[in-house]
Image (cartoon, rainbow, N blue to C red):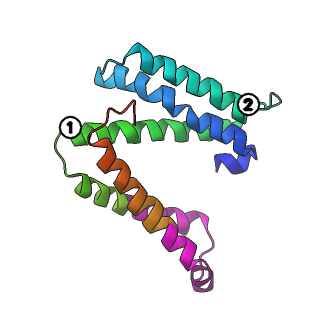
Amino acid sequence: MGVEITNSAGKSGFITGLYTVFVPIAAFLFMKKKTSILTWVGAILAVGGLYLLCMTGNEKVGIGDLVLLIGTVFWTIHILAIDKYMIEGISPLRFSQMQFAVCAVLSIICALVFEDISFVGIKDALVPILYGGFMSVGVAYTCQVLGQKEADPTFA
């Protein structure tokens, strides 16, 4: 939604990439995790590099930027939640299954509220729907949870 409003993939990439700084800040503030100076330097360099890659200098701040920033906050929360639950000993596969189920339910609710759903439309878009659901959420997020079980959230 934020990409659509801003109409800028570059700006969207930059704002979303800010999670590289939000994660260590939030981990310190809310989880009392200390982060090395090298992590802070890396995060600042990453934001600087993202800015140089993504921004043209003509951008204005708008509602789309706020939507993207809210999304970035949710990415940050997601990474920290995985860290918290992996530390507590929850099975990564169980966590991933619950994440998949919640995503499916929320997606169905949003589709019913915001989309014009038809069986013809679902049939025509079945391959992208299945790919997005199983590969992006099922496989990619499961790999993230499995990988993050052993990684510090600021590195993840």
* Residue 39 to residue 84: above or below: above
In the picture of the structure, the residue carrying the numbered disc 2 is 61
Disc 1 residue type (three-letter): Ile
Which residue is drawn at the image coordinates 68% and 28% (left, top)? 51
Location of residue 82 (image quadrant): top left
Q: Relative to residue 90, is residue 82 drawn left or right?
A: right
Q: Earlier in the sequence, mark 1 or mark 2?
A: 2
Label total for image: 2
Q: Name which residue lies at 36% across and 53% down.
A: 143
The residue sitting at the top extreme is 37
Q: Nearer the viewer, residue 94 or 121?
A: 94
**Above or below — where is 27 with respect to 125?**
above
| Residue shown at 37% from the left, 49% from the top | 144
The Cα–Cα distance between marks 1 and 2, rounded to whole angstroms, is 38 Å
Extent of the magenta region: 102-131
Q: Quick one: SS at disc 1?
A: helix
Name the residue beneath numbered marker 1.
87
**How far across and down, in percent of the image, does residue 5 sit?**
72, 47
When asked about the image quadrant of residue 98, the answer is: bottom left
SS class, disc 2: loop
Is residue 115 left or right of 30 when viewed as pictured? right
Answer with left or right where residue 127 lies relative to residue 84: right
Q: Main secondary structure of the magenta part?
A: helix
Q: Residue at x 63, y 23 (%)?
A: 48
- The amino acid marked with disc number 2 is Val
